[in-house]
Amino acid sequence: MARPRDVIGVDCDEPFELAAARVVEVRAGEVFAQLAAGVLDLGDVEPLHDMRVASRRLRAALEVFRPCFPRASYRKALKSLKALADALGERRDRDVAIEFLDGFLDGAPPADRGRLEILLARLRDEQRDANERLAPLVSEERLAELRLALDDLVGAVRR
């Protein structure tokens, strides 16, 4: 799992809003950094997991610093982030279930192997479906919209 980046330059003598802006910028950078790692790759589920964790950190930062941001900008950014996080979660749930059940397959009694294989096939179908629903949310266009919403949020504090 990707470790959170340090937020550098936070000073207890500066306004709380500036700390909020710095934290949101760093956490947003963590979300966008995961894209190059292949979030939609079903063969390697770690990049998706890392992006999901990063999106949760960003959402937590937004919620903690909610009073610092203009209401309309905050709602727009949070709505876009929530849609992304929900789609990441739907895919991640299938990844975890597949990994868990796959671990039982080799040691399963012959009578249970067929049932496990059916269940795994269904989960893999659901995983592909969840990935298809996620794909538009990690498109360049949608992520550019999210980045702009977050930039507007941070910019509103710095003006």
Image (cartoon, rainbow, N blue to C red):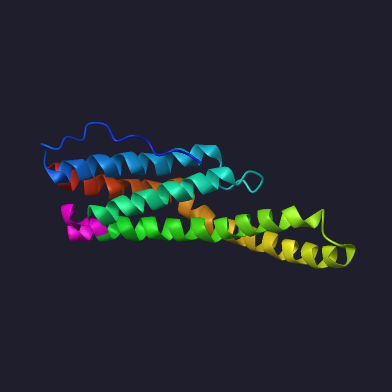
Query: Which residue appears farthest toward the right when viewing the image?
Result: 110
Q: Is residue 121 or residue 109 the one in the foreground?
A: 109
Would residue 76 appear left or right of 109 to someone viewing this image? left
Q: Is residue 109 or residue 94 the one in the foreground?
A: 109
Query: Which residue appears farthest toward the top when viewing the image?
Result: 9
Q: Quadrant of residue 14?
A: top left
Would residue 152 appear left or right of 49 to someone viewing this image? left
Whether residue 139 is visible: no
**Is 67 covered by the magenta stretch?**
yes
Whether residue 111 is visible: yes
Count of all numbered marks drawn on residues in the image: 0
Residue 30 in picture, x, y percent from top left: 40, 40
Q: Is residue 71 or residue 54 the one in the foreground?
A: 54
- In percent of the image, x 57 and y 44: which residue is there? 46
**Is 31 covered by the magenta stretch?**
no
- In percent of the image, x 79 and y 56: which residue is there? 105
- In percent of the image, x 44 and y 56: which residue is there? 85
Quarter of the image with the C terminus is top left
Q: Is residue 127 or residue 108 the one in the foreground?
A: 108
Residue 142 in picture, x, y percent from top left: 41, 51
Q: In which quarter of the image is residue 77?
A: bottom left
Look at the image and give the residue range highlighted in magenta.
66-74
Residue 59 in picture, x, y percent from top left: 34, 54
Would residue 81 appear left or right of 139 to someone viewing this image? left
Would residue 95 appear left or right of 25 to someone viewing this image? right
Q: Is the magenta stretch mostly helix, strand or loop?
A: helix
